[in-house]
Image: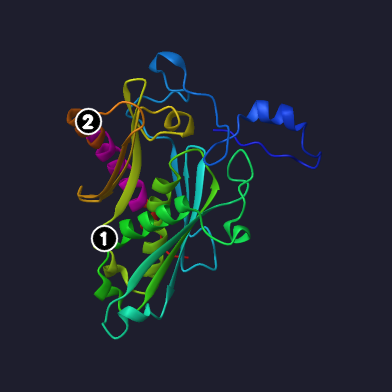
Amino acid sequence: MHSTFWYGLGPPDLGVWRQRRQPFAEPGSAGRERKAAGGVRADGRRPDELREIDVQPDWLENAHGSALIAQGRTRVLCTAMIQEEVPRWLRNQGRGWITAEYSLLPASTGERVDREASRGKQQGRTVEIQRLIGRAVRAVADFRALGERTMWLDCDVLQADGGTRCAAICGAYVAGRRALDRFGLSRTFVDSVAAVSVGVVEGVPLLDLDYSEDSAADTDMNVVMTGDGRLIEVQATAEREPFTRERLDELLALAEAGIAEIGELQAEAVAVALP
């Protein structure tokens, strides 16, 4: 992994810059080149290998909890804030609530993404992903242990190269756990939660797809699981040819192994002493 910065000399010619950088892709981007022919992953990984993952807890000072998760070239900043109130429909029931929001920063992809506030409404993709993040984290929550409080999870994509929703779920859990620990509410989470993408590209099952792989996938799947191996959500799509039940089981096993690895990294992050 390499990052490129400009140091006071001004940006290079945009045509040369685009050619050298092979811009990232999620919505609206031309994307990077596809993986190399012959089933070899462009970044040199094995089919069952995760991208390099780094989880940095407490990345921000003002948030009750925060985590910056880097997964390959994808970067997502997750924060958690706890408010002493609940939605009107939950008042006086002794239970709390957890909700999530998600957004792509304008420069997170190869082409500028408009801020949704300037459009006056959120896109369908944004609503879908933030609902997924909320469902995933709520699945491991004891709302009575939270009390009549709301925990807000905000996930902002700083740089997108595939798998942003899965990275957001993984980072949101760490940020949420840090916030809960800070206020003595650790019992709210009864288990951990993590997510990863899997797919089939040129007939080969792959773990943790980057954008170039995701855009070329015959089958694309996002899997969300608890720390003890129970399924929370499986989003599977045959982009081209339908897939068999045997292939589904193979992909789920691949995702389970990857999520177990991610869970270990999350555990290390939440074990760091609070600042």
| Numbered label attached to residue 250 | 2
| Numbered label attached to residue 140 | 1
- Separation of residues labelled 2 and 1 (CA atoms): 25 Å
In the rendered image, the vertical position of residue 181 relative to residue 87, given as above or below: above
Residue at 48% x, 29% y is: 212
Residue at 48% x, 37% y is: 72
Q: Magenta span: helix, strand or loop, mainly?
A: helix
Do labels 2 and 1 touch, CB within 8 Å?
no
Residue at 19% x, 33% y is: 249
Q: Residues within 10 Å of mark 1 (few under 14, many from 20)?
A: some
Q: Residues within 10 Å of mark 2 (few under 14, many from 20)?
A: some
User: Element at badge 2?
Assistant: helix
User: Element at badge 1?
Assistant: loop
Q: Quadrant of residue 7?
A: top right
Percent of width and height locating residue 256: 25, 40
Q: Quadrant of the N terminus?
A: top right
* Eye-nearest disc, 2 or 1: 2
Q: Is residue 204 visible?
A: yes
Q: What amino acid is found at the position of numbered circle 2 in the picture?
A: Glu
Percent of width and height locating residue 182: 40, 70
